[in-house]
Each structure stands twice: as structure tokens, then as C-alpha cells.
Amino acid sequence: MNTINKFNQRMKKKPIYLNQKGIIFSIDATISFVIALITVLIFVLYLSNIILSEERNIEQIELDQKALFIADSMAKNQNSENSLLGACNYDSDKKRVLTNNLNYTQIKTNSKSLELGDFFVKSITITPLTTNQKETIILSEKNSNNCTNVKRFALVDNLKAIIEVKTCKIKEI
Amino acid sequence: MNSLEAIIAILALTASLGILIETVNLQQENFQIASDKILAKTQSLNCAFIIDSIISNSAKEYKNELNCTANKNIVNSKIGEITKNSFIIGEANSGATLSVNTYEHYK
């Protein structure tokens, strides 16, 4: 009993310099501020994530677009400098380029890799539908783990075939 | 003592609010820049699409307006202060009119 009285007296004597309500108010304000900051941080991270994924989408679209138009140009044009951009046969009687009618020798001997900024053409693959034997013409030795393939139907030396253009991005997405 | 704590608490709250508002403003500016970058890139990509299709199809002319400038194999697009470019598979130049180097089909 004596000990309890001593304790009570000691507690009563202990001076209180700060008002308890004030301290609680300040702590509440700090906690709410921290919560608000974390919320803002999460929101900012979410926004930056959206922007980043949008940039990745655009880069992927660009890569696909390049492959698509290079394959299209190869199947529709004739280019003596680089058959990658035009490998069609030429009809000297009609004096016109035969679209969708490709020359195998031209593709094999006259195709050069094309580098467009971060993109490059890795290879062309020709698969004749009759034999189904793939032949890949490597145009660049560079390696990349971000590539895209575009397949297109065309006649290669008057045989039905699927031509496949592989474009890659130098930098990793 | 009570009023001192109240003043400190109000000051802390005001400072917190100020920091929050400043952070939001800063992020809004950053978001605007990022949005302009994406818009400029999309616009240049759009132009590259059109020019590439002109090249691959050996189109004779393109009359519609392009919101970008082409110089050799690079297409530039500008939104605000931000310029983004895209590459094209051939060559083109945009002066008064867009001129694209296409491959002749009839020789």
C-alpha cells in the first residue's frame, strides 16, 4: 500500500510540459501528411507507368510498321541498289515491273541490311509452298532480343512462296 | 502553451499542404512534357506511315497536309518545344510540297 502511494505521489509530481491534445494533433497531422504523400507517390508511379507502357507500345508499332513496309516494298518494287526494298521481276516486253513476282537471285545476291535509327533488318526467309523448305538469308550479324517478323505471300521465280522479313531493335525495350 | 502548439501544428500543416501542391504542380508539368513527347512521336510515326506507304506503293502524289517535315530518311514532328523523329525506308523531302523518291514501275 505504501509503495502504491509513493508511486502515485511520484506520478503527480512529474511535470507535464506539453499539452497532450496538442501532441496528438501534431502526430495526426504528420501521419495524414505522410499518407497524403504516399498517395501522391503511388499516383505519380501509376502515371509514369502508363507513360512508359505507352512509349513501349509506340516503339513496338514502329518496329512492326518498318517490317510491314519493307516486306511490302520488296514485293511491289524493283530496286537495283538494294533488293530488300524491291526485288520484283521486270517485264521488258510490257516495260513494267511485275509486282508480287520476285526474283530469287536478286534477293539472294543483292539484298543488304537496312539500318533505320534503332532498327535494322536481320534476315529474309523464303518458304516455297511446294517444298516447304525454309531458306534464311541473314543480312545482319547483330543480335537483339526484340525482333518482329512479317510474312507475306508472293511469287518467287514463279513459285508460290511466303517471304518473311525480320526486323529488330538495337536497344532493348 | 496551447496556442504555441496550435501555431506549430498549423505551420506544419501549411508547409505540408504547400509541399503537396508543389509536388502535384511539378508532376503536372512533367506529365505535360511526357504527353507532348508521346504526341510528337505518334505524329512523326503517322507521317512515316504515310511516306513509307507512298514508297512501297510507288504512289504518284500525296495532296493532304502533313504535320511534319521530312529530310532524307528522317521525319521530324514538333509539339511545343519537343521534337521527335521517325525513320522512313526511303528518302523524302518536304519543301513547299512533299517529294518522295519512289521506284518507277514503268521504265
Image (cartoon, grey):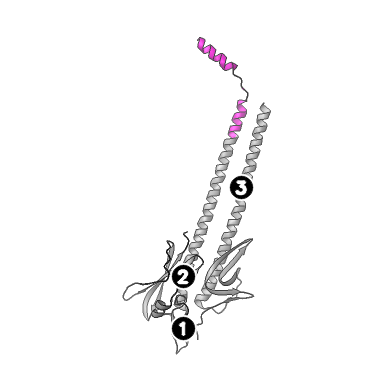
Q: Amino acid at mark 2?
A: Leu
- Residue at 61% x, 27% y is A21
User: Which amino acid type is marked by label 3?
Assistant: Val
Chain letter behind tag 1? A
* Residue sticking out furthest to the front: A141
Check residue A25 for magenta coloring. Answer: yes
Q: Which residue is mark 3?
A: B24
Task: Characterize the local packing of mark 3: few (<14), some (14-19) or many (20 or more) Cα atoms within 10 angstroms.
Answer: some
* Image disc number at residue A97: 1
Residue A165 at least partly seen = no
**Discs 1 and 2 carry the same chain letter:** yes
Q: Quadrant of residue A133?
A: bottom left
Residue B105 vertical position relative to residue A24 in the rendered view, above or below:
below
The residues bearing labels 3 and 1 have C-alpha atoms spaced at a distance of 60 Å
State the image quarter where residue B2 is shown: top right
Task: Report x, y in % for residue A87.
Answer: 44, 79
Q: In the orientation shown, which residue stands out farthest toward the top? A: A2
Subunit of mark 2? A
Alpha-carbon span between mark 2 and mark 3 = 42 Å
Q: Which residue is mark 2?
A: A68
Could you tell me residue A88's position as x and y percent?
A: 44, 80
Asked if disc 3 and disc 1 are in contact, CB closer than 8 Å, the reply is: no
Magenta portion: prevailing SS class:
helix
Using the image as rendered, state which of residue A168 and residue A153 is in the foreground: A168
